[in-house]
Image: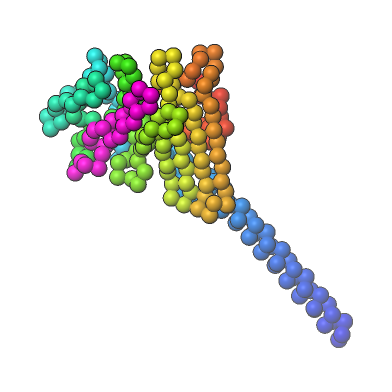
């Protein structure tokens, strides 16, 4: 009888230990999964490569001729007319959402009025690229490859522009539980606007996972400084993944 009781207690102890081990393993696995930046809720891996606006395709309709920024198609009557900024003649279709200056370089973000929260209806609206306009010593550039084209009613829709200590900065933040943000640094070099630096920061909701990534574009390759025309919207994501070689493609 005593032997049966002994074996019963031994079996019970063994079963409890097995359950404890399994529970411990499951808990560890769940913890690692929660800290995985690719799985954390609230993170949009495609945030910087949006190709549509409310389900409609982004068209590329910018026309920049003789310092005039307008559409390459007829402008709807309600937005006809122009305003001026730093020698640019800008169609009323484009709204200046922010501007900054650094050592004689002036930059502004221009958004199609159809891609701002001031529009009551988007029915049959024209959706085209947001623009970055830059003026320096009477020369002017327009970039349709820099500013996000995400929906305007989202909490964080596109970059903010400001004057930094070392140049003009464009900053962007995305995510809810998982936060992802970056800063672009722009300077004049060899008489043209150039990308100087990208800094990316990310962390999960508990801040248990944090990471920073940075890349210096000065003297990037044999072509010299990195012209802003070579920038693509997905560069911060490439930096986050460590795919530096793709910057030169």
Q: Can you tell which quarter of the image residue 120 is in?
A: top left
Q: Is residue 108 magenta?
A: yes
Q: Residue at x 30, y 34 (%)?
A: 98
Q: Position of residue 57 (x, y in %)?
A: 31, 32
Q: Is residue 158 visible?
A: yes
Q: Main secondary structure of the magenta part?
A: strand
Q: Is residue 204 depicted above or below 79 in this figure?
A: below
Q: Position of residue 140 (x, y in %)?
A: 31, 18
Question: Which of the pair 224/10 is nearer the observer?
Answer: 224
Q: Position of residue 48 (x, y in %)?
A: 42, 36
Q: Position of residue 63 (x, y in %)?
A: 26, 20
Q: Is residue 203 magenta?
A: no
Q: Residue at x 46, y 52 (%)?
A: 177
> Which portion, as a residue range, is magenta?
95-120
Q: Residue at x 63, y 55 (%)?
A: 29
Question: Which of the pair 88/19 is nearer the observer?
Answer: 88
Question: Which of the pair 57/49 is nearer the observer?
Answer: 49
Q: 223 left or right of 129?
A: right
Q: Can you tell which quarter of the image residue 193 is in?
A: top left
Q: Residue at x 14, y 26 (%)?
A: 81
């Amino acid at each position: 009888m005593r032997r049966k009781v002994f074996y019963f207690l031994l079996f019970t102890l063994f079963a409890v230990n097995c359950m404890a081990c399994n529970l411990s393993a499951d808990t560890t696995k769940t913890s690692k999964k929660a800290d995985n930046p690719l799985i954390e809720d609230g993170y949009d891996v495609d945030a910087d490569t949006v190709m549509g606006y409310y389900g409609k395709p982004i068209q590329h309709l910018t026309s920049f001729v003789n310092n005039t920024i307008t559409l390459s198609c007829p402008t709807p009557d309600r937005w006809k007319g122009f305003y001026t900024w730093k020698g640019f003649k800008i169609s009323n279709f484009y709204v200046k959402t922010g501007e900054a200056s650094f050592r004689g370089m002036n930059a502004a973000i221009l958004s199609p009025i159809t891609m701002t929260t001031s529009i009551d209806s988007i029915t049959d609206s024209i959706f085209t690229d947001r623009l970055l306009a830059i003026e320096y010593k009477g020369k002017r550039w327009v970039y349709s490859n820099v500013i996000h084209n995400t929906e305007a009613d989202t909490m964080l829709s596109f970059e903010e522009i400001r004057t930094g200590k070392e140049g003009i900065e464009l900053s962007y933040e995305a995510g809810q539980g998982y936060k992802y943000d970056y800063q672009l640094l722009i300077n004049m070099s060899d008489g043209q606007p150039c990308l100087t630096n990208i800094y990316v920061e990310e962390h999960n909701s508990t801040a248990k996972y944090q990471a920073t990534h940075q890349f210096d574009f000065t003297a990037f390759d044999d072509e010299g400084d990195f012209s802003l025309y070579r920038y693509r919207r997905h560069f911060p994501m490439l930096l986050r993944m460590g795919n530096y070689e793709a910057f030169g493609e």
